[in-house]
Image (cartoon, helix red, strand yellow):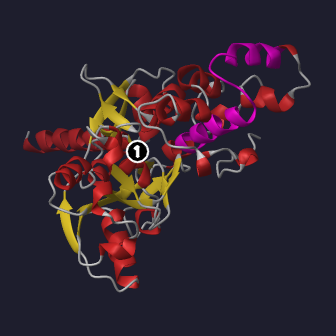
Amino acid sequence: MNRLFFGIAAFGMFLTGCVSNQNENISRLSLIQKRDELICGVSGKIPGFSFIERDGSYNGLDVDICKAFAAAIIGDSEKIQFRPLTAAERFLAIKTGDIDLLSRNTTLTLSRDSFGGNGLTFAPVVFHDGQGLMVKKNSGIESIQELANKSICVGSGTTTEQNINDTFESLSLPYIPIKYQDLNQVVAGYLQGRCQAMTSDRSQLAAARSGFKNAKDHIILDDVLSKEPLAPASDGSEQKLADAMRWTVFALIAAEEQGITQSNIGDKVQLAKNNPQLKSLRRFLGVDGGLGEKIGLRNDFVVNVIKATGNYGEIYDRNLGRDSDVTIPRGLNEIYSKGGLHISPPFN
């Protein structure tokens, strides 16, 4: 009887192990689709990129990128749970599985993108930025050299902290770092006069300044301390999710290249269906080719994305254009045909 009991118990453990292994082997992409909800890590504190409004809603470029991912992966851009994260929390949240992916003004670097580093995989860059410095206009400071021996507020645990150290050391300029956990604390320290300058990505400086009571009393210096290519990220072991994210971002860029917008996407689909000779357009919009299936998505995933968010240019203009609360000229963030850095590979 004991033998029978142990035999049944052992068999039960075997079955439990099989079920456990099956759950462990399911891809993150399939898990998101099965859950029917995307868990997206954001900041929630950066106007123009990801900001929580008084009614609890989220908006910004990073938020719209999350919506594009949800539209592509699930088919519904509203099926998202946003998780606000600090810079120190963001990578651990990916590795522990607390979030599916990160869309949080994060710089793509070798250490973060490598197996021997943070072990992440980055999607294409969604915003080309550079680190800068902001000072009060009445300080009389006009260049980085004039910040020698001055205190500078900076976020800890970020590339910003490393860049400011590298830059000042290379210029043999001593300075006093005043470190904070997140951007809001950096801004508060700066406004309270605990430092003579604050440093962050130039986009974040512009976003922060937009909320100041007297925004014109603060200037962003011309000095650019670094390249900051900001991109969404996911766990490096999840190739299927990485593929879906990569080609969703490329779809946003390719749609702008082709003049496909949120308002004309229906007409473009009908044009593709009515004209078999428009092979490239038919592949892009999922009429032919089965491209979506190759990355675990519906063949018409591009249509769902553009219906939900518009193309990359529309996302940019809505959140950072001249009619937005945070105005940042597109510059390097134009598509390649207009002198920018954004370009999509072919959808073949």
| Element type where label 1 sits in the image | helix
Q: Residue furthest left?
A: 2
Residue for point 64% across, 23% down: 303
Q: Nearer the viewer, residue 210 or 217?
A: 217
Residue 343 picture location, percent across and down: 69, 47
**Picture quarter with the N terminus:** top left
Q: Residue furthest right?
A: 277
Residue 126 picture location, percent across and down: 53, 46
Residue underneath mark 1: 25
Q: Is residue 75 visible?
A: yes
Task: Determine whether, in the image, residue 241 is placed left or right of residue 151.
Answer: right
Q: Residue furthest bottom?
A: 172
Picture layout, residue 282 above or below residue 242 = above
Residue for point 27% across, 42% down: 98
Residue 59 picture location, percent across and down: 38, 29
Task: Determine whether, in the image, residue 338 is placed left or right of residue 165.
Answer: right
324 magenta-colored: no
Q: Nearer the viewer, residue 180 or 133?
A: 133
Occupied quadrant, residue 31: top left
Amino acid carrying mark 1 in the image: Asn
Chain part drawn in magenta: 244-273
Q: Is residue 136 visible?
A: no
Occupied quadrant, residue 43: top left
Residue for point 48% across, 50% down: 231
Occupied quadrant, residue 117: bottom left
Residue 338 picture location, percent across and down: 73, 45
Q: Residues within 10 Å of mark 1 (few under 14, many from 20)?
A: few
265 magenta-colored: yes
**Picture quarter with the C terminus:** top right
Q: Main secondary structure of the magenta part?
A: helix
Picture layout, residue 228 above or below residue 257 = below
